[in-house]
Amino acid sequence: MASLQGLIGGVLIGLSAVWLMASLGRIAGISGLLSGLLWERPAGDSAWRLAFLLGLISGPLLVMLIGGGLGNVAGVPDAVIGAPAGGVGRMLVAGLLVGLGTGIGSGCTSGHGVCGMARLSPRSLVATVTFVAAAMITVYVEHHLIGGPA
Amino acid sequence: MKTLLGYVAGLLFGLGLAIGGMTDPARVIGFLDIAGDWDPTLIFVLGGAVVTTFIGYRLAWKRGAPWLAPRFALPTRRDLDARLLGGTALFGIGWGLSGYCPGPAVASIAGLSAPLAAMLVAMAAGWWLARRV
């Protein structure tokens, strides 16, 4: 069930990317889109990015409103948004790495992982393999070598 | 009109993340933990998204131009450099530590907690810093 919902969720994300390309001619890369909105404010380009941000936040809210077990949090039947994997300190470090890394590496799971791979971009393919591998190694080191999150 | 289109794109994306279970860091870390109790959900999300986008992009490009812009804005670089590799590796470490990549972190604002707020503020600071290095 989680897998089927995953597939449906993936198709919706794909439709979002296609919608943005067909209408505005843009890549649906969340890090670039939001980083630009925050720190660049390009004229004529900020309003739709802000609207995208509001839509992104209202998606899970709508799922909460609909209810009916549409949420997909592991082991919590009616939940839509899962609990953070750690405290403030861990998230400050992780957030800085995610922001810095996606900024320097020009993209994240959406821009490189979804849109870039769908374009068969060699840069995005290498980027996706790199961040998935780095994340898997991080989890392995923390959970199996050090012995569980602090 | 562009604003409405942007909202719909964001809404579809947010719905997809929530229904796909990506607003649950435990599912994401469960996927990344290949030596543990592996959770395959993320593969289905990524697979569904890439295949849909692959097909839909080609249909969109066939039309020659987007509806509301003069041309498609596509990245043209094909070279691999240290910034791409180093940046994405740093991102991966942060992703593994938190189970949040940018989309799910922002989409989870409705369930705001102190750790999520810290994640979002630090991520915004990281984006600021990245523009200066």
Image (cartoon, coloured by chain):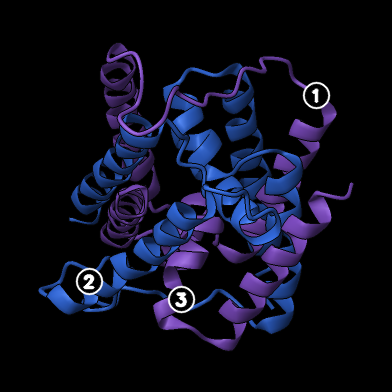
User: Could you tell me if the residues under marks 3 and 2 are in contact, i.e. CB atoms within 8 Å?
Assistant: no
> Which residue shows up at 67% across the image and 38% down it?
A106
Chain A colour as displayed: blue
Q: Amino acid at mark 1?
A: Asp
Separation of marks 3 and 2 at Cα, in angstroms: 13 Å
Residue A25 image offset from top left, x and y in percent: 42, 30
Where, quadrant-wise, is the N terminus of chain A in this rendering? bottom left
Task: Please give left or right for residue B80 compared with residue A4 in the image.
Answer: right
> Which residue shows up at 25% across the image and 59% down it?
B19
Task: Please give left or right for residue B88 compared with residue A54 in the image.
Answer: right
Q: Quadrant of residue A28?
A: top left
Q: Does A145 appear above or below B46?
A: below
> Badge 1 is on which residue?
B81
Residue A3, numbered circle: none
Residue sitting farthest toward the left = A68
> Badge 3 is on which residue?
B109
Q: Secondary structure at mark 1?
A: loop
State whether residue B37 appears in this view. no
Q: Does B43 appear above or below B53?
A: below
User: Could you tell me if the residues under marks 2 and 1 are in contact, i.e. CB atoms within 8 Å?
Assistant: no
Q: Amino acid at mark 2?
A: Leu
Q: Secondary structure at mark 3?
A: helix
Q: Secondary structure at mark 2?
A: helix
How packed mark 2 is, by other alpha carbons closer than 10 Å (few <14, some 14-19, many 20 or more), is some
Residue A62, numbered circle: 2
How packed mark 3 is, by other alpha carbons closer than 10 Å (few <14, some 14-19, many 20 or more), is some
How packed mark 1 is, by other alpha carbons closer than 10 Å (few <14, some 14-19, many 20 or more), is few
Q: Nearer the viewer, mark 2 or mark 1?
A: 2
Separation of marks 2 and 1 at Cα, in angstroms: 41 Å
Residue A121 image offset from top left, x and y in percent: 55, 19
Residue A139 image offset from top left, x and y in percent: 63, 56
